[in-house]
């Protein structure tokens, strides 16, 4: 007969494992800046705690050693580090040993341990540190790629749209100068917002203003082919959101939903509060697409002109977590509805 502890039974081994996981998580965070980062000393303290040894050191490729704990007697740790950096293999012997830190066969640095009684935990920690450094590097590269995509997105004003908008404005200079002047101001607002802003975040109100400006220009270009409905609840206007997440979705609705067909199309943009979330939907009754194609686009496997949708989805997930990515509802000849859901308030997100 087996006995299962009740809910109130104490299980110290579980508490110990949770504590170890907590330390490991903090160490991984402290290594976010690499072996030369500002938090490397805190990472070394955590590694020493995980190994339960008298002293631990981490060295980067320059050989600079960050040490915490008791220095080993009669051992030149700098010489150990230099030996490992040149041979990329273990140096020293228990209880003081230095092992290389690798990621994908690339040497990243050296782990030095004093007071170790066995090599297996040291090797495991060295492998884990290498994996953590590689994950942090990949995350950093992903962030850089997202920022590069955002810069590309800011510069991605369709030449076709610019040409058509300016042509319409020019055609109205004599017949309707007031309307021409109004559209020229809209065009200036549109380009200024798309190109000149440098912050990471803005407000729903500013994004909706940019949307209205863009749609005013598109209505001038497309005439009766484009109908627009915009509704936004006052309580969400001040909500902070990543810059340039709504405007690209509206542009997609017009360019890929309405423009390809000859008959009149409708674009609806709504913003409202649902509990503690701000929910914004962009819907068109245009040509739509195969859901499989939409899934590929969100996975970053779409064509070059789909960078806007992919970039918006990735940035939302990076800022708010995977739960807050885009939701796309579409089918061929059934239009497309894209839903953006963000918290009404998120720490660190402010215009």
Image: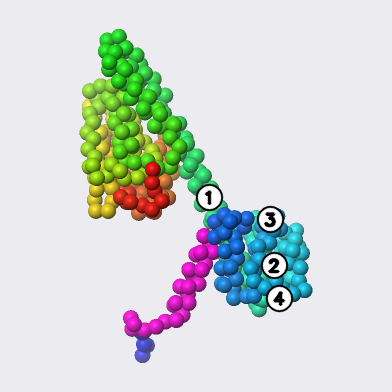
Disc 1 or 2, which lies upstream in sequence?
2
Q: Which residue is mark 2?
A: 98
Q: Position of residue 70 (x, y in %)?
A: 67, 73
Judged from the image, the secondary structure of the residue bearing numbered disc 2 is: strand
Judged from the image, the secondary structure of the residue bearing numbered disc 3 is: loop
Q: Considering depth in this image, is 292 or 237 the residue closer to the camera? A: 237
Asked if residue 277 shows in the view, the reply is yes
What quarter of the picture does the N terminus occupy?
bottom left
Q: Residues within 10 Å of mark 4 (few under 14, many from 20)?
A: some
Disc 1 or 3, which lies upstream in sequence?
3
Q: Residues within 10 Å of mark 2 (few under 14, many from 20)?
A: many
Q: CA distance from mark 3 to mark 4?
A: 23 Å
Judged from the image, the secondary structure of the residue bearing numbered disc 1 is: helix
Quick check: 38 above or below 284?
A: below
Asked if residue 332 shows in the view, the reply is no
Q: Is residue 227 left or right of residue 79?
A: left
Q: Which residue is mark 3?
A: 61
Q: CA distance from mark 2 to mark 4?
A: 10 Å
**Extreme residue toward the bottom, this view:** 1
Q: Which residue is mark 1?
A: 140
Q: Which residue is mark 4?
A: 94
Q: Position of residue 246 (x, y in %)?
A: 34, 39
Question: What residue is rendered at 67% in x and 67% in y?
Answer: 112
Would you say residue 88 sits in the magenta stretch?
no
Read off the magenta span.
6-29
Q: Position of residue 101 (x, y in %)?
A: 64, 61
Question: What residue is rendered at 36% in x and 52% in y?
Answer: 346
Q: Residues within 10 Å of mark 1 (few under 14, many from 20)?
A: some
Quadrant in the rendering for residue 241: top left
Q: CA distance from mark 4 to mark 1?
A: 36 Å
Q: Considering depth in this image, is 147 or 273 the residue closer to the camera? A: 273
Q: CA distance from mark 3 to mark 2?
A: 14 Å
């Amino acid at each position: 007969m087996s006995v299962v502890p009740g809910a109130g039974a104490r299980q110290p081994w579980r508490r110990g494992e949770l504590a170890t996981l907590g330390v490991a998580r903090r160490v991984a965070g402290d290594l976010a800046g690499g072996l030369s980062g500002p938090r490397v000393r805190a990472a070394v303290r955590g590694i020493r705690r995980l190994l339960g040894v008298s002293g631990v050191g981490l060295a980067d490729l320059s050989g600079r050693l960050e040490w915490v704990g008791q220095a080993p007697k009669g051992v030149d740790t700098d010489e150990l580090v230099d030996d490992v950096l040149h041979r990329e293999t273990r140096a020293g012997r228990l209880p003081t040993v230095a092992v290389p830190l690798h990621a994908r066969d690339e040497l990243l640095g050296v782990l030095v341990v004093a007071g170790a009684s066995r090599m297996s935990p040291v090797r495991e920690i060295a492998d884990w540190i290498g994996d953590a450094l590689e994950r942090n590097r990949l995350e950093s590269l992903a962030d850089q790629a997202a920022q590069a995509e955002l810069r590309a997105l800011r510069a991605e004003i369709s030449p076709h749209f610019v040409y058509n908008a300016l042509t319409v404005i020019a055609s109205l200079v004599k017949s309707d100068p007031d309307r021409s002047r109004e559209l020229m101001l809209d065009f200036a607002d549109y380009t200024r917002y798309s190109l000149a802003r440098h912050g990471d975040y803005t407000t729903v109100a500013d994004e909706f203003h940019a949307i209205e400006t863009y749609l005013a220009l598109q209505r001038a270009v497309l005439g009766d082919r484009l109908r627009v409905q915009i509704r936004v609840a006052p309580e969400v206007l001040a909500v902070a959101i990543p810059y340039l997440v709504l405007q690209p979705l509206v542009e997609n609705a017009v360019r890929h939903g309405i423009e390809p067909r000859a008959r009149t199309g409708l674009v609806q943009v709504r913003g409202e509060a649902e509990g503690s979330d701000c929910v914004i939907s962009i819907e068109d009754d245009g040509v739509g697409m195969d859901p499989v194609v939409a899934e590929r686009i969100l996975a970053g496997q779409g064509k070059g002109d789909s960078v806007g949708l992919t970039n918006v989805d990735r940035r939302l997930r990076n800022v708010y977590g995977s739960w807050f990515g885009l939701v796309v509802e579409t089918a061929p000849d059934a239009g497309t509805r894209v839903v953006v859901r963000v918290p009404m308030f998120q720490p660190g997100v402010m215009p």
